[in-house]
Image (tube, rainbow, N blue to C red):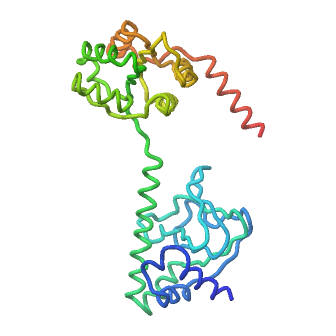
Amino acid sequence: MDRNELISTLQDEGNLKHSFSAEDIAVLAHHMSIKSFDDNAILMHKDEPADCMAFLISGRVQIIEDERQIAILTTGDCFGESMFSEEATRVASVQALEATKVGLFSIDDFHALLETNQRLALQFREIFKAVGRARAEQHAAETYTDKRKYLALIAHNNMKESLMEFCSMHTNKLEQFPLIATGTTGSMLFKKTGLCLSRKVASGPLGGDQAVGTLISTQNIIGVIFFRDPLSSHPHHADIEALGRLCDVYQVPFATNPQSGEAILDYLLSGKADHDPLPNRVLEAYVKGQKKVVEAG
């Protein structure tokens, strides 16, 4: 019964059905062993030899790397395809999220299939290699770390012309930094000065302030020049306050008018920004408190 369930699962679920006939899939299934795992069981361990792959007959599993969930897989999905990659060991662990049953396809099973049906074995190997490459590329994209240090240029609508005038006066200084701004500000900046953005965010009310705030928390912002309109109300006032608060937390220079903006540019270009800042005692105390919470848990 388990064997028939495995065959029907591979034929009806997952992606094999798009590349192989039902008969070819049945041949593959007959070269697998079937194993059941309890909830929370570890099916594969990171750093162990990558000598088999598996197909989910029933249940769900999660892929974990360094305590971070990479993916959740369900019926018909496969994992462990690194068996056919250049990686000698597994790069992640697999844990059952409920009672789970899988079909295991080991390197010995592959060699047995290779002896009886070389054409089919090599076709399966190429498919599994392609799956592995696609997942590796997706993982690389998801874990990509941007190491650039941006200067953020932000302005309320009524202040955008003032920001453009400021940028026109200081083009030679601004071109020495990777710049980040909204698409609207970026378009105006290019037309007025020829300067191009290195990264673009949404407008403030649509999350742009929060996006810059996220980059502040990852230490990707070296300064914020935010020409605020002091005589108008703004629907995203809370986001503006949060942006200033994060600048204080991470000691990022924050200018709100042309004079302070010029001071920031001169400071950043002086090389003083490369020196270690004064210790942030409030932040240090907060981090220690969070560590105690984790340890207590």
Residue 184, horizontal then vertical, whole percent: 35, 30
Q: Quadrant of residue 87?
A: bottom left
Quadrant where the C terminus is found in the figure: top right
Q: Is residue 143 left or right of residue 179?
A: right
The residue drawn where x is 23% and y is 26% is 191
Residue 290: which quarter of the image?
top right
Q: Residue at x 65, y 62 (%)?
A: 95
The percent coordinates of residue 252 (x first, y second) are: 47, 19
User: Camera-side residue: 219 or 193?
Assistant: 193
Instruction: Give the camera-side residue of 11 and 204.
Output: 204
Horizontal side, residue 48 vs residue 129: left or right: right
Find residue 52 and report its horizontal and vertical position in percent: 54, 74
Vertical position of residue 47 compared to residue 185: above or below: below
Total labels drawn: 0
Q: Quadrant of the N terminus?
A: bottom right
Relative to 198, is 226 above or below? Answer: above
Q: Give the farthest residue toward the top.
A: 259
Q: Residue at x 44, y 68 (%)?
A: 131
138 to 110, vertically: above or below = above
Q: Quadrant of residue 163?
A: top left
Q: Residue furthest bottom?
A: 116
Please state the horizontal and vertical placement of residue 82, each as a whole percent of the image.
47, 67
